[in-house]
Image: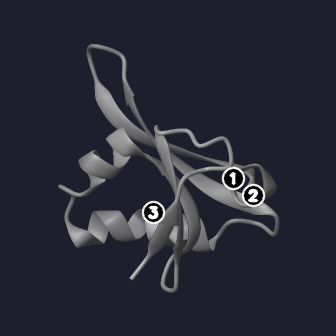
Amino acid sequence: MAKYKNPPDDSEQYRCFVCPVCGCFVISLMAEDHLAKFPIKDRMYYSEKAKAAREGQVLIIQFLDDGSEALTAHRYDDKAEWFR
């Protein structure tokens, strides 16, 4: 149900989503591939984080791989930087 578009700078590393269930969020392509393999209850964690964003903020989900460990991380950023 979510619709996406590229960020304003046309980065091919991220997608900006608008979802009627989760709200707005931004996800890196690597994190999107990684999260697709998670059980639904684990993906819902990020849905709740997206809905909990303060006014003017958006959830950013990234995949981090330091060579020894790969994990998904999140942070909040200025929504205006990603959705114009």
- Residue at 39 percent across and 83 percent down: it is 1
Residue 79, position as x, y percentages in the image: 75, 57
Tag in front: 3 or 1 = 1
Query: Under tag 3, what secondary structure?
Result: helix
Mark positioned earlier in the residue sequence (2 or 3): 3
Residue 82 % position (x, y): 69, 52
Q: Nearer the viewer, residue 5 or 56?
A: 5
Q: Is residue 30 above or below residue 27?
A: above
- What label sits on residue 79 in the rendered view? 2
Tag 1 near tag 2, CB within 8 Å: yes
9 sits left or right of 44 in the view: right
Per the model, the C-alpha gap separating discs 1 and 2 is 5 Å
Please tell me whether residue 21 is drawn above or below residue 3 in the rendered image: below
Tell me the tag on residue 17.
Answer: none
How far, Cα to Cα, is label 2 from label 3?
A: 16 Å
> Do the residues under discs 3 and 1 have CB atoms within 8 angstroms?
no
Tell me the quarter of the image containing the C terminus.
bottom right
Residue beneath disc 1: 82
Look at 38% across and 44% down and name the residue there. Answer: 29
Indicate the quadrant where residue 66 lies: top left
Q: Which residue is more in the foreground, 42 or 34?
A: 34
Circle 2 packing at 10 Å, graded few (<14), some (14-19), many (20+), is: some
Q: Mark 3 vs mark 1: which is more N-terminal? A: 3
Q: Position of residue 53 (x, y in %)?
A: 68, 65
Q: Is residue 64 left or right of residue 42?
A: right
Q: CA distance from mark 3 to mark 1?
A: 18 Å
**Tag 3: amino acid:** Tyr
Amino acid type, callout 2: Lys
Residue beneath label 3, please? 46
